Image: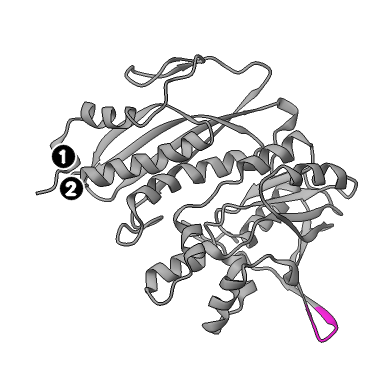
């Protein structure tokens, strides 16, 4: 009979987390084991805070998502938020709600997946909470990063005439999820993009430090939704060029084989965790410097316009047409008007 988390005490579970953590840094004056953590602020920088929850049955399915990937994703989605703000990750707080029948091996794997990613990005776990869940597995992670006051990126700095760029490729994570759900065909890179997304922390830092981006947002709920959110926050419109949207060839083939439009599907796809950002026309040299050290390819996909309309431009037969870009990304609740 396998051991579950119900067979151990909370202290035992915390100890299993601690064995996977590096020594606390000097700036963490009080860490795991007390009522709260005590940390020393970083000089001449402001703090950036974000929190995200992953809920079984909403964000992942344990039937086909390995435990280590669950832990990886729980931290990655938060690091992506810091990347969009141009912040350097510093610490994390973990809050887990665990079903009583969760095997202890699965618990260990969840923690290993999270702490392995934390180590890669120099994130220190400062504490958290463990509780029993009568229902699904839930992981709630809070992260803290730092950035110089005048370098913090937001969604509301874009102006008409700014160019819009996106990092990496889009649509692969959603295609990977469909592959896992259908168990029909599999393209490993797409599956991996869903299971273990790579937050663009380095690129976000470079965009901020080089003052290359005027506005930035991460693609958690899809590129189309992100364009709308950036446009609304900045008070601009946008035109996206369909032919420039970066879609992995294998993903394009996956959608076309099913009679689907790769561009429409990829624009609506969530879980990419790439960055969408606006760049001033005169910032080409700063952008080149940021891109050179950012660790991810970038693609110009459109531009910001006057007014508030967000459109998709397609070119066919030598002529172009523009149509409204629908807000088709993932929504937890009712679609906004």
Label 2: how many Cα within 10 Å (few below 14, some 14–19, many 20+): some
Q: Residue furthest right?
A: 282
Q: Position of residue 192 (x, y in %)?
A: 47, 59
Secondary-structure class at tag 2: loop
Residue 101 numbered mark, or none: 2
From the viewer's perspective, tell me whether residue 300 is left or right of residue 85: right
Give the color scheme: rainbow, by chain, secondary structure or one colour: one colour
**Cβ–Cβ under 8 Å for marks 2 and 1:** yes
Q: State which region is magenta.
A: 315-320
In the rendered structure, does residue 319 fall within the stretch colored magenta? yes
Residue that label 1 marks: 6
Q: Position of residue 169 (x, y in %)?
A: 63, 61
Which quadrant of the view contains residue 299? bottom right
Say if residue 333 shows up in the picture.
no
Asked if 115 appears above or below 2 in the picture, the reply is above
Residue drawn 16% across the image and 39% down it: 6
């Amino acid at each position: 009979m396998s051991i579950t988390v119900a067979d151990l005490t909370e202290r035992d579970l915390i100890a299993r987390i601690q064995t996977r953590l590096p020594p606390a840094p000097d700036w963490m004056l009080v860490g795991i084991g007390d009522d709260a953590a005590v940390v020393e602020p970083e000089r001449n920088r402001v703090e950036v805070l974000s929190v995200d929850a992953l809920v079984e049955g909403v964000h992942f399915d344990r039937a086909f998502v390995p435990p280590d990937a669950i832990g990886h994703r729980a931290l990655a989605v938060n690091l992506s938020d810091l990347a969009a703000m141009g912040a350097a990750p510093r610490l994390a707080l973990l809050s887990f709600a665990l079903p009583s029948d969760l095997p202890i091996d699965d618990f260990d794997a969840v923690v290993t997946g999270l702490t392995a990613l934390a180590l890669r990005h120099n994130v220190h776990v400062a504490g958290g909470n463990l509780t029993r869940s009568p229902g699904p597995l839930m992981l709630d992670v809070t992260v803290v990063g730092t950035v110089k006051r005048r370098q913090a990126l937001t969604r509301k700095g874009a102006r008409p005439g700014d160019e819009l760029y996106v990092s990496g490729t889009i649509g692969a994570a959603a295609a990977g999820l469909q592959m896992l759900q259908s168990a029909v065909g599999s393209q490993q890179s797409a599956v991996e993009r869903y299971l273990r997304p790579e937050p663009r922390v380095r690129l976000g830092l470079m965009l901020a430090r080089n003052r290359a981006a005027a506005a930035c947002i991460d693609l958690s709920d899809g590129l189309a939704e992100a364009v709308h959110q950036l446009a609304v926050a900045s008070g601009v419109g946008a035109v996206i060029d369909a032919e420039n949207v970066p879609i992995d060839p294998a993903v394009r083939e996956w959608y076309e084989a099913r009679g689907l439009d790769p561009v429409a599907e990829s624009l609506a796809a969530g879980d990419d965790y790439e960055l969408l950002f606006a760049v001033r026309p005169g910032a080409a040299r700063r952008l080149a410097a940021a891109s050179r050290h950012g660790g991810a390819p970038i693609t110009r996909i459109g531009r910001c316009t006057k007014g508030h309309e967000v459109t998709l431009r397609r070119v066919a037969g030598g002529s172009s047409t523009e149509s409204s870009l629908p807000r088709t990304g993932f929504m937890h609740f009712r679609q906004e008007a």
